């Protein structure tokens, strides 16, 4: 057994890559259909959008680039579907220059599915330089921060922005963020001063750091990673890419947990490492 | 299907497979994909900045709307570039002074308010109890746990006194809280990386269909063949690219 443990500990790492690849591929080709449990923080975002009357202004800031697309793009699709279904006035924008094309595509793509007209029902403001300063500028005067939208139309003339002079008139802001500027920037430089309600959708890597903001009510809801996107898709009854990916996600987690447990077991079974850890204990005394 | 979409699918599938080829070992396909990625990202950023910043936020306001004071910001921006000319590089300090001064002035009060005061309030408030609510509910237990965590972690990072006696005990508890935090962070990071993998596999499966001319399968075969030929042509003796840490453990003590 100890010999086997030693051999397995020296296993080529490419075997692990193959295992992970299979665990990802098989559920994607043959979905299992694991249930998706909706967490309260995701439900809070959904509930807030549900509570908004038709015609309310919903600002979606797509603060990410293609590197985070698998996690945040499904969130954007789900949120836009929900907003258009609720007949909200949708304003899209981005604080990340490299995400501009992708952000425009998702906003206009979902809008066209609902037959929404650009300028009347929705707009995409595009990118404006300055990062967090853009948020401050939008809080003072939205048309000064974005004199024209992404398509070159004067924002002051857009029917969708009638009555919206600054962020104070925006009913709900959701930042889909893969880093900085993102949710925290929207809170620090936007919500705290201009008083709109703020929700977040973030990559799994930065989600743990935002839970303190959720607990204190600084953000009203949080959609975290692919799991959060799958939960939101479940809530709106639209099984999309996130739900489809959750089977693969669960399978890979199962493999990783199994490998961690096995490797730890083998580590202690291996005569060489057992002797070494024993000698270390001796040295510690 | 439009030829541009088909071409895009083949390029995307090919470059994805080039990047994945690194899992075998560092190779020319990976290096090609990596360099192309960096170049295209930079090229895209420059084009967007030209239109969104230079044209939309500078040229149009100045030339068409007469907002000449926008030139002050432009000059400050240009001064940063004087760093490349040693004789006048001191001029860049003016721009940096404005950036640092403005940035700090805006950020410091907000960070104190949001990341310190409101977080302290959020930590303590649930413990003070609300009218009509039990003082010993689960919310209070959670709040107490968070409070213990915050205090013990702070004690651990308090290096002005020696960690002895009760301080050592508190610091030790703080370490456990930190470990739980790191564990949660690692778990989420694994989830994020797997999500990225799922996203790429999703596209590769799509591009493997007949509609896209079996792009994934054809390119996978080509890259595998290319790697095989590259290995054969390699003059240096090559063995399995093992993890160096594993090799170290093989050496007898």
Image: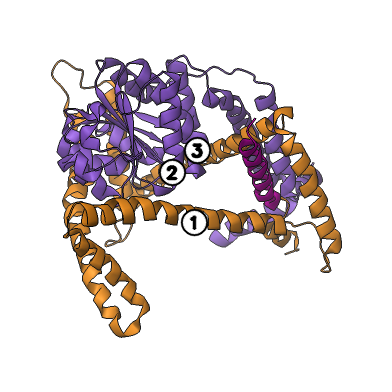
Chain colours: A purple, B orange
Q: Are marks 2 and 3 on the same chain?
A: yes
The residue mark sitting in front, 1 or 2, is: 1
Examine the image and state in which quarter residue A51 appears: top left
Q: Is residue A107 left or right of residue A87?
A: right
Tell me which residue sits at (17%, 36%) in the image: A166
Report in which chain the residue with disc 2 lies. A
Provide the residue span drawn in magenta. B1-23
Report whether residue A9 is seen.
Answer: no
User: Which quadrant is home to the N terminus of chain A?
Assistant: top right
Crowding at mark 2 (Cα within 10 Å: few <14, some 14-19, many 20+): many
Q: Secondary structure at mark 3?
A: helix
From what the image shows, is residue A250 above or below residue B30?
A: above
Tell me which residue sits at (35%, 23%) in the image: A117
Q: How far apart in space, not on screen, are marks 1 and 3 (Cα)?
A: 20 Å
Q: How far apart in space, not on screen, are marks 1 and 2 (Cα)?
A: 13 Å
What label sits on residue A69 in the rendered view? 3
Report in which chain the residue with disc 1 lies. B
Residue B72: x %, y % from top left: 19, 64
From what the image shows, is residue B151 above or below residue A75?
A: below
Q: How far apart in space, not on screen, are marks 2 and 3 (Cα)?
A: 9 Å
From what the image shows, is residue B32 above or below residue B191?
A: below
User: Which quadrant is home to the C terminus of chain A?
Assistant: bottom right
Q: Which of marks 3 and 2 precedes in the sequence?
A: 3
Report in which chain the residue with disc 3 lies. A
Q: Secondary structure at mark 1?
A: helix
What residue is pinned by disc 2? A99
What label sits on residue B43 in the rendered view? 1
């Amino acid at each position: 057994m100890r010999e086997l443990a030693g051999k397995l500990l020296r296993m080529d790492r490419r075997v692990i890559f193959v295992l992970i690849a299979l665990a990802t591929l098989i559920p994607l080709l043959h979905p299992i259909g694991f249930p998706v449990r909706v967490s309260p923080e995701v439900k809070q975002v959904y509930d807030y959008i549900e509570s908004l009357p038709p015609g309310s202004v919903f600002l979606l800031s797509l603060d990410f680039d293609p590197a985070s697309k698998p996690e945040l793009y499904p969130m954007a699709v789900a949120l836009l579907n929900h907003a258009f279904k609720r007949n909200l006035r949708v304003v899209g924008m981005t604080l990340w220059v490299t995400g501009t094309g992708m952000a425009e595509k998702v906003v206009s793509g979902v809008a066209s599915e609902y037959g929404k007209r650009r300028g009347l029902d929705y707009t995409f403001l595009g990118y404006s330089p300055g990062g967090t300063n853009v948020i401050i500028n939008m809080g003072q005067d939205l048309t000064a921060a974005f004199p024209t939208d992404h398509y070159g139309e004067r924002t002051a003339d857009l029917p969708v922005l009638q009555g919206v002079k600054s962020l104070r008139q925006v009913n709900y802001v959701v930042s889909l963020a893969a880093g900085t500027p993102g949710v925290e920037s929207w809170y620090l430089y936007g919500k705290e001063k201009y008083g709109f309600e703020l929700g977040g959708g973030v990559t799994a890597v930065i989600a743990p750091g935002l839970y303190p903001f959720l607990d204190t009510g600084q953000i009203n809801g949080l959609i975290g990673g692919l799991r959060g996107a799958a939960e939101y898709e479940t809530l709106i009854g639209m099984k999309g890419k996130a739900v489809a990916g959750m089977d693969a996600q669960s399978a890979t987690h199962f493999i990783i947990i199994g490998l961690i447990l096995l490797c730890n077991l083998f580590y202690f079974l291996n005569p060489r490492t057992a002797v070494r850890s024993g000698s270390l204990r001796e040295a510690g005394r | 299907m439009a030829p541009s979409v088909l071409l895009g699918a083949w390029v995307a599938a090919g470059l994805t497979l080039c990047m994945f080829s690194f899992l075998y070992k560092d190779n020319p396909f990976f290096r090609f994909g990596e360099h192309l990625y960096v170049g295209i990202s930079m090229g895209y950023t420059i084009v967007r900045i030209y239109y969104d910043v230079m044209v939309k936020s500078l040229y149009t306001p100045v030339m068409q709307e007469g907002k000449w004071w926008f030139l002050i910001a432009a000059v400050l921006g240009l001064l940063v570039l004087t760093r490349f000319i040693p004789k006048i590089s001191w001029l860049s300090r003016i721009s940096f002074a404005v950036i640092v001064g403005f940035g700090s002035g805006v950020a410091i009060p907000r960070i104190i308010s949001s990341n310190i005061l409101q977080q302290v309030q959020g930590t303590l408030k649930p413990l003070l109890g609300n009218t009509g609510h039990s003082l010993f509910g689960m919310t209070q237990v959670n709040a107490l746990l968070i409070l213990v965590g915050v205090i013990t972690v702070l004690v651990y990072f308090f290096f002005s006194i020696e960690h002895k006696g009760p301080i050592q005990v508190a610091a030790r508890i703080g370490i456990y809280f930190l470990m739980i935090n790191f564990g949660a962070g690692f778990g989420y990071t694994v989830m994020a990386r797997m999500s990225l993998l799922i996203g790429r596999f999703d596209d590769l499966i799509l591009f493997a269909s007949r509609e896209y001319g079996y792009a994934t399968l054809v390119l996978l075969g080509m890259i595998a063949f290319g790697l095989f030929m590259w290995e054969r042509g390699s003059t240096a003796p090559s063995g399995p690219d093992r993890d160096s840490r594993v090799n170290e453990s093989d050496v007898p003590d």
